Every structure is written in C-alpha cells, then in structure tokens.
Image (cartoon, rainbow, N blue to C red):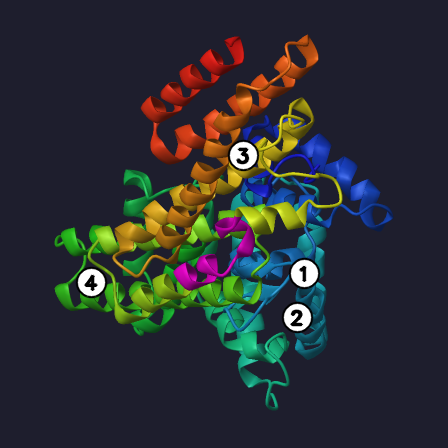
Amino acid sequence: MTGTVSPEELEQRLFALQPDQFLELYRLYEKLGSKANVLPEMQILRRRLVRMRPVRALTFSRLLCQPFEEFLVDEVTGDTGLIMRRSCRAIARLVRRKLAPDLLRRFEQRLAHLNQRPEDRAGQILLGREIWNAAAAVLSEVRCGPARSPQDLRRRFGLITGCLEIGEAMVSLSRGIPEGRVDRLDDSGRKLLVKLLRGLPHDRAGHARYLMALLTRRLENPASVIQMLAKDDRNLPGATRQNLIRIIRGEIESSIGASAAALVVGQTGSRESVQRAERLLDRLGQIKDSGAATPRTDKAARDIADTLGGIERLISVEALRQDRQEQIQQLLPTELSAGLEHAETYRELENEIDNVIRLGDRIDKLGVDNPLRQRRDRLRRDIDGRRSEMMRRLADTPAEPAAQASARAGLYGLVRMVEMLDGPKAAENMRRDGDRLLAG
C-alpha cells in the first residue's frame, strides 16, 4: 500500500473511512500480523484507533496505559519524551508485581464486570482513577539505576508517573480533541482545557506540563495554545498563564528540536522524509507567526534547511539521473529518441522541482539561509541548457509519425519543467516555438 501512495496520503484516506469500514480494515491487518510486511500501515492505523477508541476487551494493561497512550510510538529515534508501545506489557507486569494481591484481585474482578458493560464509561474512569493512582505510587517508589540507552524504559518513568497522577485529566483532554489532524482547539476544547488546568493539583505548573505535551503531540499548530492563553485573561491568573506559556513553549521547542535532529539522521531524500520536513517547516512557520519563536526554534529551522540542502535528489538533475541509471538512459529528452518511455522520469523530476520550490518558499518565510535557492538556480540553468539543445534538434526531426510523436512528447515534458521554474508564459512560448519547428 505504501509503495503506491505516501504515508501522508494513506493516513488521509484511512481517516476519511467510515468507522465501521476502518475497523474492518484494521481487523484484517491484525490477522495478517507478522505474516506480511504491514508495520508502516499498522502504525498509521493505530493512530486513528487510539482516537476512535472502539469497544475492545478492557484489560489491566490497556486501562493502565490510557493516560499516556498519546505518547506511545512503535519506534523511538532519540530521547524525545516518547514511550515504546511494546513497553506497556513491561509496565503492567511491574505494577501488578508491586500491588497488594487483594487489591489486584479486586481490580481484576471489576475489570471483568466492566467487560460485560462496555458502555459504562463512567465506571471505566472510576476504576481507571484507582489503578492510575496505585500505579503512580508504585512507579514513584521504584528505585532505578542509570538508563543505559535512549530506549531504556527507565528514562520514561517521570513522564509515565506524571501522566498517571493526573490520569483522568489526560484521558479527558485526549478524548476531547476530535480524531484526525486538528489545527487548533475549538471553543469546546478551549473550555475543557481551562477546566482541566483549574482542577490540577497545587503544583499546577508541574502537572500542566503533561497536558501541554499532549497538545503538542495532537495539534498541528500547538503554538495556537500560546495565543489562546495570552488572550484568556478571565479564567486563569496572569502568573499561571505566563507559566503555562513558558511550559508549552518548552514542549514545542523540545518536540521541534528532536524532530529536526531525527531528520538530520535520516537524510534519505525519500518522499516520507521530505514530507516530514515540510510539516516541520509549516509548524515552525506557525510558531513564528504566533510570536513564539526562540533561538532554539530558529536553530531547528536552520538544521532542517541544512538537511534539505544536503539531499542530493532535491538539488541536482544529475543526481536523479544517476539514481535511475539502471532503468533510464537519459533524464530529459535532449535526444530525439526521448519520448513516452520517459513519462515516469518526468513525473519524478516534476516532484523534485516541486519539492525544491515548495520547501524553498517555506524556508524563505522563516528568515534563515536557504540552500535550496541556489539549487533552484542551478536546476534552472540545467534545464535552460537542455531546452536550447532540444530546440536546435527539433527542426531535424524526421516526418515519420513515430518520430514526430516521440519528439512532441519530449517537448511537452520539458515544457512542463519550464512552466514550474519560469511560469506559464515562458512555457507557452517554448511550446509554440517547438510546435512551429516540428511543423517544418
């Protein structure tokens, strides 16, 4: 599935499915399991499943992990404040081992009762509150040695314990945000956030961090929360609002910094890495527009720009040719033999040019050095040279229909490249000149 569409497109399609259609698809992938290479699809499916919360058997582990389920990921690329999904079983085993046997037995009995009444959401929250408090106390008492790696679960105990201590607030906020990609909180979401903030324990700033981290994970534009808090002078004291703004700014900085660092590590030039970079640039643009930019976010912008500047396939026609040399003899139709067989190459090159232009425009808006501007100029010079060579050869095209069709296909492919780089007027002039030469 991901071989024909990008993860972004796949996620959009999956989130557009009706709930019953989506669940049917999820069950099919669950059956495939390890028998097929479906991990990328399962990662996307789980993101929606978490937010849909369909009726499923309620287990101790599943209920225990609800307060921090937004931070569960299939793979951690660094110390980004996230938790490996497979760690849930280890956490549950640890908590169960430390709980008093009679308390654990009562929990299990109530879980069995709730599984017979799946519609009893209030009962789930009541039981969850007891389990979360008990688990938080257990984890707070566990003495941990130094963590051996960024993936070591002990590095996450602070996050896990904090989420459990305000478990009901974390679950309420997560469920109060619509599923799918949400740009900012709506009115009901803002009211819910204020209500939850006002109901936090006395060390409001410490526990608020986890609510802010959740918003940073769920919202496409988490900087909008800063604007919301700055304007809301009726529901929260000024000092509290300033403290919350500081907290969410720090969460945004950490999230952006970790994502930028992970992007630097993976300079693949793949569609997925380019799309991740684009989303990060968009988020940085939102931060800048909100007035929340800091030296750390500016550094992240420079890091992303430098990374994009180092991806060969984004900056060089020649690199793309070399990348396809086993399948394609020539990149652009500089020879009259170039024609319809190069249609796939045109699509590839069109995507690369579009990436250079689109990403370059976003970097310009952030006000940092733009390595793609120079690459775009180089790309333009390369295509200008090929255009000149093609125009010299078109007049000598044989009159045979096959030769004419091949040459015209090559001409129109290059016209599209010129349109992207120099605009429709230059492309139309080239098309007219080429057609005139072919007509003899």
Q: Quickly name the residue at label 4.
A: 241
* Secondary structure category for the residue under label 1: helix
Image spot of residue 42 (x, y percent):
69, 46
Residue under label 3 = 12
Amino acid of disc 1: Ser
Q: Would residue 220 be seen by someone viewing this image from the given angle?
A: no
Q: Which mark is residue 91?
A: 2
Q: Earlier in the sequence, mark 4 or mark 1?
A: 1
Q: Type of residue at label 4?
A: Arg
Quadrant in the picture for residue 430 = top left
Q: Which residues are magenta?
A: 304-316
Which mark is first along the chain, 1 or 3?
Answer: 3
Q: Are dots 3 and 4 in contact, CB under 8 Å?
A: no
Pointer 1 residue: 61
- Magenta stretch holds residue 309: yes
Per the picture, the main secondary structure of the magenta-coloured stretch is helix
Task: Compute the Cα span from label 2 to label 1.
Answer: 8 Å
Farthest right residue in view? 35
For image coordinates 67% across by 67% down, the residue present is 87
Is 245 included in the stretch rendered in magenta? no
Amino acid type at mark 3: Gln
Count of marks, rendered view: 4
